[in-house]
Image: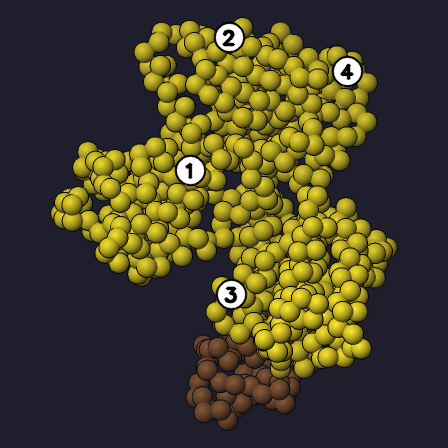
């Protein structure tokens, strides 16, 4: 299982994150979840997400989050 | 089993509190919470108007969390030197504090409990440190004064609780603010801080409902003292100065003694030689806790879970009232598996952390401290004396007569309300209806035209049990219903319940009732109440009590206070 899924499920229990193409368009996450997700990713992976990077685009799917983290030097 | 009660929490603030609402809902443990955050910045609209849609969900709890520089405009002006006269801003700020306090006071009657985190300036507002506490100028001084003013204004209001946010931040040890989140979503606080706040608020809610542990069972070797007394000998134990490890264990004992002094009972479960272990407790010069501080012990080589279960029977409390502290992970696992109701926190790896670990536990929260709390351990010891004479005296009647039991019945009063509410919410075994109400709701109910409530104070020649009984009636025409009938398990088995019921039924009759109904609910642990009332029924349809089976026993002297 993708290791991001437990982090996301902690945020929104019972939601299916594995198949979603866009968490925000599909109503699985909202903009408030985005802030909590950023905090969770920061403490888990030791990265810093700057204010201009806190946009749904970067966190809309498992692949998008992986790409974003890869840009910060974190490989999942 | 009854469905778990869900408590509704309304969050009102000057920043986005939605993440806190979600964290409160996710936070484990009782009570289950349904939380909603009102749109931020509408504090006065919501507090001052009961018609605001935020109240539609009929919340049980209200949290009003504001930041001083946002809710008190004059504080912001002081911070940014945006004033013609600092003195003037200072005065305005205090008027703003009163306005805020008035609004909270106006909203308070709509809910059971209001939590107001104290004001605190963001940690990045260094300002001019030299002047921060200067009277009539410094924001730090002003915010401290504003908090004190809130404490004064709320002092007589039992259902408003000021929460120490300074403590939250200090104990967090991580940044409490996140300027990015404020820029993105008007969330002033970091996720870590909001999680901390959620945990603390949840423990306050749990405490306000009275469902918190009452007993700590602790191990001895490497828990109360350093070393193994059977191997090392009493003289080689690490306990007390000058040994630094010994100081740590002494600090831990001192923290335990503090809890004992405010009503948490202490007991021991240890694999040891009983005589040797007790000699350390009695004689070691550095022991803070002595035999009198413990209400019971099982010092033997048996399974600790079985020992704790026995202690629960001896102390007459349910296992969910127990906390178990042991340095051994194996023993902790064993107790967790065998007795899942017992709360078994992990101990920190170093004894230097034992004291701080214990004093930072949030499971012993309580809305009030009563006389009964301060005297609890002493009362259990008096009970030991009673049981000892029971073993030498003849029959039950003779023993009861020798105790010289006195019961004082009185109508519920403001002065006895907080203890009565504590009893109502904490009692699980001798409880007819398991009705749980906060102080205000219980008082309001008891003042209803056909309602009445009575408290019972019990003492005997060994000592005072304090206020240990509560009964309430709802009378309609010639029929009365006993709504609550609650008695502390400490006085069970002395026919005191007979006296309480005799009095309650007499009150119902003098209010005009010919039939008195008492219907025990089917709760998980109120067997004693179910059995007692089951034996009092006359047996037809609605099962009224049989007056022939109700009487104050002759061994008990009952007095009535006007």
**Which one is in front, B553 or B28?**
B553
Q: CA distance from mark 3 to mark 1?
A: 29 Å
The residue at which mark 4 appears reads as B511
Same-chain status of marks 3 and 1: yes
The colour applied to the residues of chain B in this rendering is yellow
Q: Which chain is brown?
A: A
Q: Residue at x 57, y 48 (%)?
A: B206
Find residue B170 and name its label.
3
Name the spot of residue B66 as percent of width and height, x first: 70, 65
- Whether pointer 2 and pointer 1 mark residues with C-beta atoms closer than 8 Å, the reply is no
Q: Earlier in the sequence, mark 1 or mark 4?
A: 1
The residue at which mark 2 appears reads as B555
Numbered disc in front, either 4 or 2? 2
Q: Earlier in the sequence, mark 2 or mark 1?
A: 1
Q: CA distance from mark 2 to mark 1?
A: 30 Å
Q: Work out whether B256 lies above or below B53.
A: above
């Amino acid at each position: 299982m993708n290791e991001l899924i437990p982090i996301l499920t902690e945020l929104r229990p019972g939601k299916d994150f594995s198949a979603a193409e866009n968490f925000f368009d599909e109503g699985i996450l909202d903009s408030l979840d985005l802030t909590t997700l950023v905090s969770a990713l920061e403490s888990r992976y030791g990265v810093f997400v700057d204010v201009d990077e806190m946009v749904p685009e970067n966190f809309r799917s498992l692949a998008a989050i992986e790409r974003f983290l890869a840009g910060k030097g974190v490989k999942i | 089993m009854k469905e778990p009660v869900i408590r509704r929490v309304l969050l009102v603030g000057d920043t986005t509190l939605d993440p806190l609402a979600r964290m409160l809902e996710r936070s484990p443990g009782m009570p289950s919470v349904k939380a909603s955050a009102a749109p931020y910045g509408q504090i006065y609209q919501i507090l001052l108007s009961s018609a605001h849609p935020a109240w539609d969900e009929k919340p049980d709890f209200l949290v009003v969390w504001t930041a001083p520089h946002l809710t008190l405009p004059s504080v912001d002006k002081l911070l940014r030197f945006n004033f013609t006269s600092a003195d003037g801003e200072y005065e305005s700020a205090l008027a703003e504090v009163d306005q805020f306090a008035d609004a909270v006071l106006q909203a308070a009657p709509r809910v059971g409990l209001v939590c107001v985190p104290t004001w605190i300036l963001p940690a990045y507002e260094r300002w001019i440190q030299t002047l921060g506490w200067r009277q009539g100028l410094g924001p730090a001084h002003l915010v401290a004064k504003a908090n004190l003013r809130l404490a004064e204004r709320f002092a007589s209001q039992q259902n408003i609780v000021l929460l120490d946010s300074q403590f939250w931040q200090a104990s967090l040890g991580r940044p409490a603010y996140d300027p990015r989140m404020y820029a993105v979503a008007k969330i002033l606080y970091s996720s870590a801080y909001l999680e901390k706040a959620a945990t603390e608020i949840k423990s306050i809610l749990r405490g306000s409902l009275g469902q918190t542990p009452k007993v700590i069972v602790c191990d001895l070797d490497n828990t109360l003292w350093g070393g193994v007394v059977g191997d090392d000998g009493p003289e080689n134990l690490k306990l007390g100065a000058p040994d630094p490890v010994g100081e740590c264990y002494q600090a831990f004992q001192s923290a335990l003694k503090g809890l004992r002094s405010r009503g948490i009972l202490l007991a021991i479960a240890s694999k040891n030689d009983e005589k040797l272990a007790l000699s350390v407790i009695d004689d070691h010069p550095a022991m803070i806790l002595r035999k009198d501080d413990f209400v019971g012990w099982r010092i033997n080589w048996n399974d600790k879970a079985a020992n704790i279960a026995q202690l629960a029977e001896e102390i007459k409390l349910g296992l969910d009232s127990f906390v178990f502290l042991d340095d051994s992970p194996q023993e902790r696992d064993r107790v967790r598996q065998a007795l899942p109701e017992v709360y078994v926190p992990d101990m920190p790896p170093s004894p230097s952390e034992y004291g701080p670990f214990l004093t930072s536990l949030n499971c012993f929260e309580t809305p009030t401290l009563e006389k009964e709390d301060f005297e609890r351990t002493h009362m259990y010891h008096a009970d030991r004396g009673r049981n000892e004479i029971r073993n030498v005296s003849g029959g039950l009647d003779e023993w009861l007569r020798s105790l010289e039991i006195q019961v004082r019945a009185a109508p519920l009063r403001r002065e006895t309300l907080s203890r009565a509410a504590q009893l109502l919410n904490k009692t699980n075994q001798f409880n007819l209806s398991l009705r749980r109400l906060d102080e205000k709701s219980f008082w309001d109910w008891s003042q209803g035209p056909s309602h009445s409530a009575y408290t019972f104070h019990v003492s005997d020649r060994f000592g005072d049990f304090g206020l240990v009984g509560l009964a309430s009636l709802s009378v309609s025409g010639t029929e009365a219903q006993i709504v609550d009938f609650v008695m502390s398990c400490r006085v069970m088995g002395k026919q005191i319940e007979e006296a309480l019921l005799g009095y309650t039924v007499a009150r119902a009759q003098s209010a005009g009732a010919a039939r008195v109904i008492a219907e025990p609910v089917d709760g998980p642990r109120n067997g004693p109440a179910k059995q007692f009332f089951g034996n009092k029924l006359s047996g037809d349809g609605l099962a009224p009590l049989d007056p022939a089976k109700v009487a104050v026993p002759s061994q008990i002297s009952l007095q009535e206070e006007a």
